[in-house]
Image (spheres, rainbow, N blue to C red):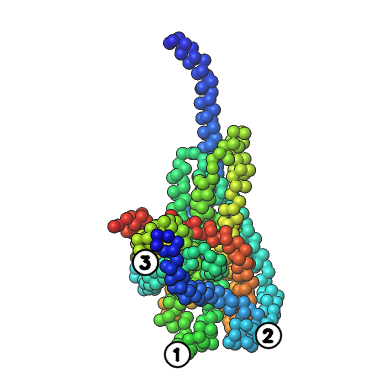
Amino acid sequence: MAEATSLRGTAAAPAQRRAVAGRLRNRHREWLAGYLFVAPDALGLLVFIGAPMLLSLSLGFFEVSGFGTYEFVGLANYRRMFHDPLFLLSLRVTLTYIVMLVPALYVSGLGLALLIQRSTRFNAVVRSLLFMPQTVSLVVVSLVWQLLLVDKIGVVSRLLRPIGLGWISWLGDPHFALAVIVVVSVWFLMGFYMLIFLGGLQDIPQEYYEAARIDGAGRLSCFFRITLPLLRPTSFFVLLVSTVTAVCGSQTFDLVYVMTRGGPANTTSLAIFYVYQQAFLFNEYGYAAAMASFLVLVLIVLTVCMFALTRGGRFTYD
Amino acid sequence: MTDPALAATPERRIELAALKPARLIFHLTGILLSAMAVVPLLWMVSMSVKNSDELFGTGLLPQHPTLANFLYVFTQVDFARYLLNTLFVSASVTVIALFFHSMAGYALARLRFPGRDAIFLAMFATFLISQPVIIVPLFILVRWMGMLDSFAGLIIPSVFNAFGIFLLRQFYLGVPRELEEAAVVDGAGFFRVYWSVILPLSRPILSALAILFFLANWNSFLWPLTITTDRKLWMVQVAISTFRAQYNASWNYIMAASTVVALPTLAAFVVFQKRIVESIKTSGIK
């Protein structure tokens, strides 16, 4: 018995070893393939996103002249930041923008999604039309809205004349300019959030609603007891993404750059626009980098806060 | 009494009766909201065919429609060149990005190698870093690489984003393994498997992403604005943003140019709306 097994063992050993070696070689081949496949994107992301992030942090410690000479200035840029009234103002403007934009996007996105969630042909058309602004460039969006908002003779002013608001200079009045930027942002972005919410609504099993209806639940209680709780992961995603969008989405820069250039009286000077101005108008690269890295820090804190508040998007606080 | 159909009918009738005005209101709301989304764009088109003397006339429909504004845009400004530049850059970015992202997505979903999950996490962490935040150091980096005022500078940094990798990886996780295993047994290398099995399988998602990438690059403004000073390299968005300063109140020219810029994206959306809508709906975290 023992002899037989050992015999079989010795006979099988080389073949087995060859098989193991082959498998190892295969495994290494898979490793190599994996690294090679990932390499272009990994390197690209490292160079064009990772490196700039690190560079941003370190650049903040330097005074960079327009000719590309660097002088180490320690924390001077960071200190200057908090004594710069225009930067502090731009932070306040950004905060106001977030506070107005995020709830507006949440409500309009969810509202529109609820309104057209049933898949009828009418709803499909409405859905596409509502998403349409998203496909147009922000520069064009800015120009079109500037046209609509031209003082006194623009469409908006003419529409509002009967109720006595025709005289308002929407983009020229410090009281209204930021609100206009918010409205245009919502007009542009709502279709996107509507689709995200539609995706979330589709994932809620219909049986829940049927069961609730049998139990005699009304529409409102269905919404508050089923829809909202089960929509929590989507809500988390929407709140997070729209907050980031409000701080540094492309609409934040493009709309302000084309429509108001930060004016009137710096009331639409969002932080990201101020950073751009400092860097590319005044060649203050070091100072701009310091402010940008502060924004990154704010974003990270916001994300962590939201993550903690919602326990990782699971929203199990009850 | 015990017949469920009989018991249900009166109730259903009441429900239907209650629905009719509700449905009317519902449809009106839908139409009103769609109009709010679309009318500004119609206004743009209408303005682009108006004579300069009826610019701020009351109607949406122009009295004497004209194509002179478009002619002006293409003859007085080098608009055709800006369009070609934009087409070239957007198409290049789209093709390169799809190639890289599908390779990476496939490897991250399917191949086993040490550090795979760490690499994926690191890539995913760049998801929320948008270009405006890193624009200053990115500009300095690209200047140091000597890519200012060049097509390379316009194209290469725009290729890389975590969104595409993430969506493709998700897609490949859902593809049945048997399909590639058959090819592996036949002795095909990993690149062969990727090229002749995986790529053809991913045609639907690749086409959806292609549209999204193309639109994003066609519409991008901040990056081309930052790194091109040479007019010959201008992209359309940069060009039309300067129109406002140049043709202060000539809204017919500005809107004609805007229409030319927006029309391809609107057309692409109308044609591919189903795919675009589906791919965005699935992009939310669930």
Element at label 3: loop
Residue at the spot 59% in from the left edge and 76% down from the top edge: B42
How many neighbours does mark 3 have within 10 angstroms: few (below 14), some (14-19), or many (20 or more)?
Answer: few
Amino acid type indicated by mark 1: Gly
First reached walking from the N terminus: tag 1 or tag 3: 1
Residue highlighted by disc 1: A164
Which quarter of the rendering shows the N terminus of chain A?
Answer: top left
How many neighbours does mark 1 have within 10 angstroms: few (below 14), some (14-19), or many (20 or more)?
Answer: few
Q: Give the alpha-carbon distance from disc 1 to disc 3, as whole Å.
A: 41 Å
- Which image quadrant for residue B64? bottom right
Q: Give the alpha-carbon distance from disc 2 to disc 1, as whole Å.
A: 32 Å
Circles 2 and 3: CB atoms closer than 8 Å? no
Residue at the spot 64% in from the left edge and 88% down from the top edge: B53
In this orientation, which residue lies closer to the viewer: A32 or B190?
A: B190
Residue highlighted by disc 3: A218
In this orientation, which residue lies closer to the viewer: B118 or A231?
A: A231
Residue highlighted by disc 2: B64
Residue at the spot 56% in from the left edge and 49% down from the top edge: B102
User: Could you say where residue A265 lies in the image, as x and y percent from the top left?
Assistant: 42, 80
Mark toward the viewer: 1 or 3: 3
User: Could you say where residue B267 lies in the image, as x and y percent from the top left?
Assistant: 63, 67
Mark toward the viewer: 2 or 3: 3
Q: Residue furthest left?
A: A318
Q: Chain of mark 3?
A: A
Can residue A68 be seen here? The reply is: no
Q: Is residue A2 left or right of residue B197?
A: left
User: In the displayed structure, would residue A226 be above or below residue B192?
Assistant: below
Amino acid type indicated by mark 2: His
Residue at the spot 57% in from the left edge and 59% down from the top edge: B275
User: Could you say where residue A64 lies in the image, as x and y percent from the top left?
Assistant: 46, 63
User: In the displayed structure, would residue B261 be above or below residue B199?
Assistant: below
Q: Give the alpha-carbon distance from disc 2 to disc 3, as whole Å.
A: 55 Å
